[in-house]
Image (tube, rainbow, N blue to C red):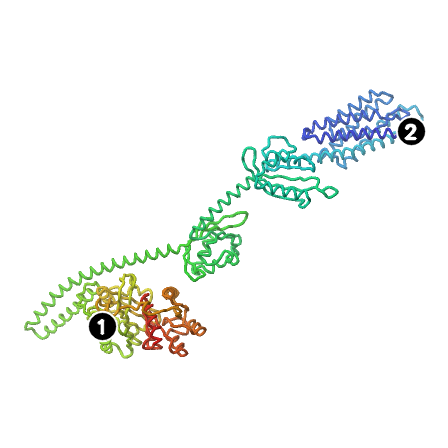
Amino acid sequence: MFSFVLQSLTSLLLTGILVYAVFASERLRSRKLVQQALLGLIFGVTVVLLGMDAVLIDPFSAPFDARSGPLIFAGYLGGPIGAVIAGTFGALYRVFLGGPTTVVGVFMNLAIPVIGVAVGYLRPQRNWPAIENSAIGYLIVGFSALHLPAFLYFTNISQSPTPYPTLVLTTMGFIASGILAILVTWQILKYAFHFATQNNQSADLTEKLNLAMQTSGMGMFDYKKGDPGPIFDAGLMAIYGFDRKPGIVPFSVWTPHVHPDDLARILKAMKQTWDGEKTQNRLDFRLLRPNGSYRHIRAVFVAQMDVDGTVKRVTGTNTDMTDIREAEQRHQVSQDRLAVIVEKLPGVLLEMDATAPDRPMLKYLSAKCQDIWGYSEEEFFADPLLFVKMHDPDDIGDFLEHISKCIETGEPIFHRYMITARDGQTRWLDYHGSSSTENGKVLVKAIVLDATSEVEAQKLMEAEREISRRAQKHESIGQLTGGVAHDFNNLLAVILGNLELLRDEDLPSNQTQMIDAAITASLRGAELTKNMLAFARKAPLTPVTLDLNNVVREAKNWMARALPASVVVETSLLAGLWSIEADRASLESALLNLSLNARDAMKGHGNLTIETANVRIDEAYIDARQEELIPGRYVMLAVSDTGPGIPDDTIGSIFEPFFTTKPPGLGSGLGLSMTVGFMRQSGGTVQVYTEIGEGTTFKLYFPASVIDGERLSTPIHASKIGSITGQRLLLAEDEDAVRETLVTILERAGYQVTATPSGDAAYAAFQADPTFDLLLTDIVMPGKLQGTDLATALREQWPKLPVLFMSGYASEATVHGNGLRTKDIRLMKPVQRTELIAAVGKAISDSKE
């Protein structure tokens, strides 16, 4: 009995091995019909083998064996094909065996596979050839039910009067042995399928790994202790360009292909690995292939340890990194080129993540940002709102609206705006930007260019265009006015002459009065044409050498009669004033016009100040009316009032002929235009300074007399002042541009300058360090201390402190005489370099006497 069981189990195990071979075969994969036919053949052969080991059971000499398992699974797994093949094998063998139960044997060999086919159709397999657990119960029930016809058959042919006990026991034995065969076969097949699946998965994984390694430029090596060299697989052979099959590559073949500069490093790393110092290692090296090309290789290897702790083998991979390295080199070249372009750009590149519009994130900013905004990249990354803080407040809303529109529509934008940089300077920037969506993020990329020089050039061009326009306008008006005045004078000459002839006649008194009125009107017309000729710069002038101080002193006498007592007239006349050459009558007329205009502006109440000063202009100078004034020596006559000032929308028209803000009948509008024409005809110009709520100053610049000017105007050069080494100046000036210019001039002259933006700041600076040699201060500044207040406050503690005052605005007329000493020097803006240095040197020198 033991031999029967062992032989049956051996046959079933052999069946499992053959089934494993069928399902592990790569060639048979996905060929189900062929696999089912082979299963039928394998199960049929197994049935024959099991039949040869069968044991005959009395009283019918029926073979007792384990054929039930292979037969039923031949139908369940092999389907109709497998059932026919396995059933045919079993039936033929049963016929060959013979005996009294041949018919029953043939029936059972054919019926059992049919039971398997039926269960396969009733319980379809979702994952063939896996056998579902629920199907085993149906197979067993079907198999058990199949024994009922055999039981009835044996009952009919039995000779025994009581066959039932024996037949029942015999049938139960056949059923039990068959069920056991089914269960054993099921388990063997289950493991066969499991191992075949694992084999297939391993084969697929190996194939995929080989494919991945081949396509990714990878290869493997295995180096066992004692071998002459590592074993290279096909992928590694392809990487190295070796025309040989996978196998051992001796060091004598491998090492010559490693770049000489990298070989020592590789050998050292391998020694560390074999010595156990580093069980894992990674390094990059260059490989010279047989065709002469270089490849960049990355080697990764790991050591496997023996039981005694020594290294027994080293396994690893080589990856061809050539494409990556070449791409990195191309990228680096592109980056270098881009860096050169960015460095040459008069601006910066920036990239913002605007996915969250209310929280934009700075992604990239080129280094030139510090040249434009004054802040470094790190500072912008720490606080991106610096862009907004320095942006022109009046423009930031429009700019952000443009950015939002760019993000919504995807259209590029251009926007020019103004910023105030960290150093306080104003710059103009051109923003060229666009937006895109990348990986779900909204990115805004832009080039921001410094357009300051372009804007300044445009402003200069506009100024030059305005100069040309005004010049053409004045020239046209001058020609028209001169022509009209000339013809009108001719007409007046005829009218006046005839009127005077008529007056000589003996006429009634009432007619004589009418003629006298007409003569008076003609004379007034002649005066009007004279004013028109003055504006056109064609008035007949009789220039004589004049001392402006004397003219002002004499004018002050008749001004007392022309001005009300509520207008206080003050004069500030410079001693040593240069002489001028001008028409006295026109000069007095201009002075009278300016005085009357000042009276009207102040509505008859206020201070009127007349000043004189010597002015040197070293470089070409553009006056307030965009007319050029050539360099030279000039004498300035300033008339200042304390009126309301001239509005911006009016100041551009005050010198136009017939323009007036006075009520009808109270002004012809020719006073200022006549003054301008007289000054330009005399080689000078007129400037106006005004401040709303403070007042207005008109400054007339006369060329100094050539002979007398040379005698009176010898400048004091720094070389005549003596050594200025160590002399320290305290400067108080609220205008940034003026302050910077003054500092530059004085420092180049050798002075040490401390600059402050107000009188209050200057006072604090002097209190902290009272070692300054001179105070140079503007008169009108923001804060509590004006220039004169500052001088008075400091001189209370340092009485000998020399102070140099600068003035240029109309409001300064109210401070004349307040805090100024007789010897104090007062400079009129604009201050020329030579005059400034000379005045500073003279003030310091006088204070030491």
Amino acid type shown at disc 2 = Thr
Mark 2 neighbour class, 10 Å CA radius: few under 14, some 14 to 19, many 20 or more: few
Amino acid type shown at disc 1 = Asp
Q: Which quadrant is the C terminus positioned in?
A: bottom left
Of the two numbered discs 1 and 2 in the rendering, the one whose residue sits closer to the viewer: 1
- Residue, disc 2: 166
- Relative horizontal placement of residue 700, taking residue 771 as reference (left or right): left
- Residue, disc 1: 547
Image coordinates of residue 470 in percent, x first then y, are 27, 59
Please say if 14 is above or below 505. above
Image coordinates of residue 734 in percent, x first then y, are 39, 68
Q: Quadrant location of residue 654?
A: bottom left
- Relative horizontal placement of residue 611, taking residue 365 as reference (left or right): left
Distance CA(mark 1)–CA(mark 2): 164 Å
Image coordinates of residue 251 in percent, x first then y, are 63, 36
Q: Secondary structure at mark 1?
A: loop
Q: Quadrant location of residue 260?
A: top right
Residue beneath the point at 20% across and 65% down: 534
Number of disc labels: 2
Which badge, 1 or 2, is on the more N-terminal residue?
A: 2
Please say if 189 is above or below 823. above
Please say if 220 is above or below 641. above
- Relative horizontal placement of residue 748, taking residue 364 as reference (left or right): left
Residue 648's disc is none
Q: Badges 1 and 2: C-beta atoms under 8 Å apart?
A: no
Image coordinates of residue 736 in percent, x first then y, are 39, 65
- Relative horizontal placement of residue 608, taking residue 83 as reference (left or right): left
